[in-house]
Image (cartoon, helix red, strand yellow):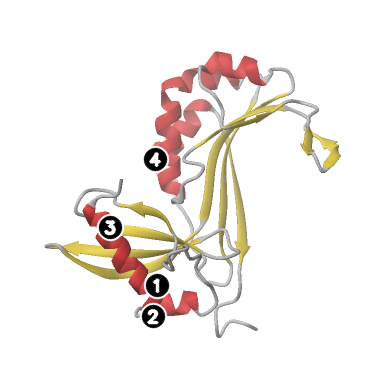
Amino acid sequence: MASTNHLKAIQVAQEEVLNKRWGITQQVLEVHSVVFCQDGNPEVKRVYEKEPGEDISVFFAIQDQPYFYVVVVTVKENDFAVGGGYIEAKVRVYLGIYSEELTRDEITKRLGIEPFRSWRKGQPFRASFPQRKHEEHACQFHAHPETPGSVEEKLDELVRQLTPVKDEIRQLGESCRLEVTIVYENWGGDPQFGGFNLNAGHIKFISTIGAEVDCDLYSFGPKMLGEEK
């Protein structure tokens, strides 16, 4: 259940989306529409507060787009006010373990944890396209797959989840292909687009397990007004 502070932050953020007082909100919602709930309020996908008492970020879903509009609510002496806004890309971060020989069950037995997604060698990519088949067995371990968040936050979570089995993962690298994948789907109409960083902890973990890094960047959505040409 949401805390009182989060409920107040949601109310302030929803009012900003409806009234568009900040320039960034106007800029984004001139060419986008948020998703609305049945009660007529903008749909909230996530409320995030890194530490108690810090700014509260309220994520809103955007119609027909993968990314989110985020309203930042500042909290000072029980006074809640909009402090800014920004587009947050839809992000997926995961470790993939791929092998032509080791099956899903053999990989998970060695690690003692279950993957979020897996497939077997020879399995069709999609039921609607059975001609194309996977050439490797695969296990993918995702960080917060259903929750909006930054690359940095999801890399932190992936490191936290997999650190207890980092030695086992490294050993699998002797017969498997290890790949940390970052999928970043952002608003292509924003000239600044955004980006992400890998800190020393992320790099150390990836180096320790001996994985490659694959970054897939995608842009979606309408042009910003004034940038149509």
Mark 2 and mark 3: span between their CA atoms?
Answer: 24 Å
Q: Which mark is residue 200?
A: 4
Say left or right for 133 vs 30.
Answer: right
Of badges 4 and 2, nearer the viewer stands: 2
Which residue is at 21% across, 49% downward?
A: 52
Q: Quadrant of the C terminus?
A: bottom right
Of badges 3 and 1, nearer the viewer stands: 3
Residue toward you, 168 or 137: 137
Question: Given the image, on which type of amino acid does mark 2 rest?
Answer: Gly
Secondary element type, mark 1:
helix
Q: Earlier in the sequence, mark 1 or mark 2?
A: 1
Mark 4 and mark 2: span between their CA atoms?
Answer: 35 Å
Q: Earlier in the sequence, mark 4 or mark 3?
A: 3
Q: Earlier in the sequence, mark 3 or mark 1?
A: 3
Mark 1 and mark 4: span between their CA atoms?
Answer: 37 Å
Residue furthest right in the image: 131
Q: Which mark is residue 70?
A: none
Q: Which residue is mark 3?
A: 7
Mark 1 and mark 2: span between their CA atoms?
Answer: 11 Å
Q: Which residue is mark 1?
A: 17
Mark 4 and mark 3: span between their CA atoms?
Answer: 35 Å
Residue toward you, 101 or 46: 46
Q: Which residue is mark 2?
A: 23
